[in-house]
Amino acid sequence: MPTPHAYFQGRIVPLGEAKIGVMTHAFNYGTAVFEGFRGNWNAEDGSLYLFRMREHYERLARSSHILGLELREPLDRLCELTLEIVERSGYEEDVYLRPMVYLSSEALGVRLHGLESDLLIFITPFGPYLDIDKGARCHTSSWRRVDDLGIPPRAKVTGIYVNSALAKTEAELNGFDEAIVLNADGHVSEGSGENIFIVRGGRLITPAPSDNILEGITADTVVELAAAELGVETVQRSIDRSELYIADEVFMTGTAAHLTPVVEIDRRVIGDGRAGPVTRELSDLFFDAIRGKSEKYRHWCTAVRARVAS
Ligand code: PMP
């Protein structure tokens, strides 16, 4: 039986022992930055492939820097700790790793300075998030993406996810799978937890970082695969809501969502209502890469062999 483990207060412990007090600053005020990356199970060789772990920790370091939180552990140590958690947990299925730097002081008072921060990392099993085969039916959210002048969205701040949760809940309660969130300027920003791409005239187009997106690692992966394997270039520029409707193809990318085709937006069918040819080709390349099946992109993966949990 797998036994999930966590790194908590400087030690690797069974997940059930990793508990915070109710006065913890991050719990009260959302003062934490985090990451999420997947370990993708490859049954053929009995390994979990951690996808672009180092890049996720680099983004964690950047998020911490933006908020002025201290991330004491160097990158190599973060990767080492993660491998140990994965090994000791013993999963033989797709998993999700959740590192977090959080204000751990049990103190009231809204601020970011003069408080203790700590690192935690936990693991949990994690299957598909959106239905990749059917594709996502989306709507334009009535909520706006938080602005860099409010809470900078290029930092993956826990508190920001109230913005995402408002959008996701509105979408689902209205019968859609996912929200597309516009920024305060009215341009397309991203999904509740995904970056968005359109295909027009054989090129990929995706909003620029200044459109208040999280700079996604899956998006970066797809851009590289598109250029190297398909000779398809990506343009970063603002996208209007109505441009989504007339795109040849639309898809979303994210650690949770992988690469999900968007087949309908605001009750308009996109393309022919199924994943388009560019999306399908990219999808095949992507799934081979993340499960360690592509020799060329093996450097994106850290393999952890399954072993009995201790
Ligand atoms: N935007 C938001 C708001 C997200 O939460 C995520 C998921 N981390 C993404 C985009 C996609 O980022 P990534 O591909 O690095 O998971």
Image: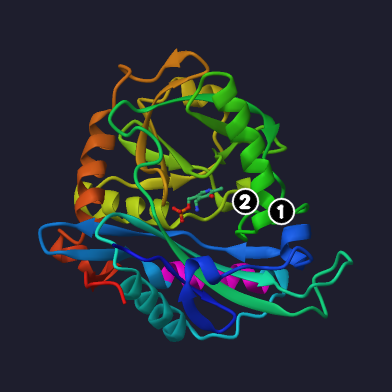
> Is 187 included in the stretch rendered in magenta?
no
> Is 57 included in the stretch rendered in magenta?
yes
Residue at 70% from the left image edge and 45% from the top image edge: 146
Image quadrant in which the C terminus is located: bottom left
Residue identified by numbered label 1: 148
Residue at 33% from the left image edge and 47% from the top image edge: 233
Residue 280 occupies quadrant: top left
Q: Which mark is residue 120?
A: none
* SS category of the residue bearing label 1: loop
First reached walking from the N terminus: tag 1 or tag 2: 1
Q: Could you tell me the amino acid type at mark 1? A: Asp
Residue at 47% from the left image edge and 59% from the top image edge: 36
**152 is higher (above) or lower (below) than 244:** below
Residue 45 occupies quadrant: bottom left
Q: Is residue 45 left or right of residue 302?
A: left
Q: Nearer the viewer, residue 171 or 230?
A: 171
Q: Could you tell me the amino acid type at mark 2? A: Ser
Residue at 71% from the left image edge and 69% from the top image edge: 67
Residue identified by numbered label 2: 210
Give the percent coordinates (x, y) of residue 38.
37, 58
Q: Is residue 280 left or right of residue 251?
A: left
- Magenta region: 55-65
Badge 2 density bin: few <14, some 14–19, many ≥20, Cα 10 Å: some
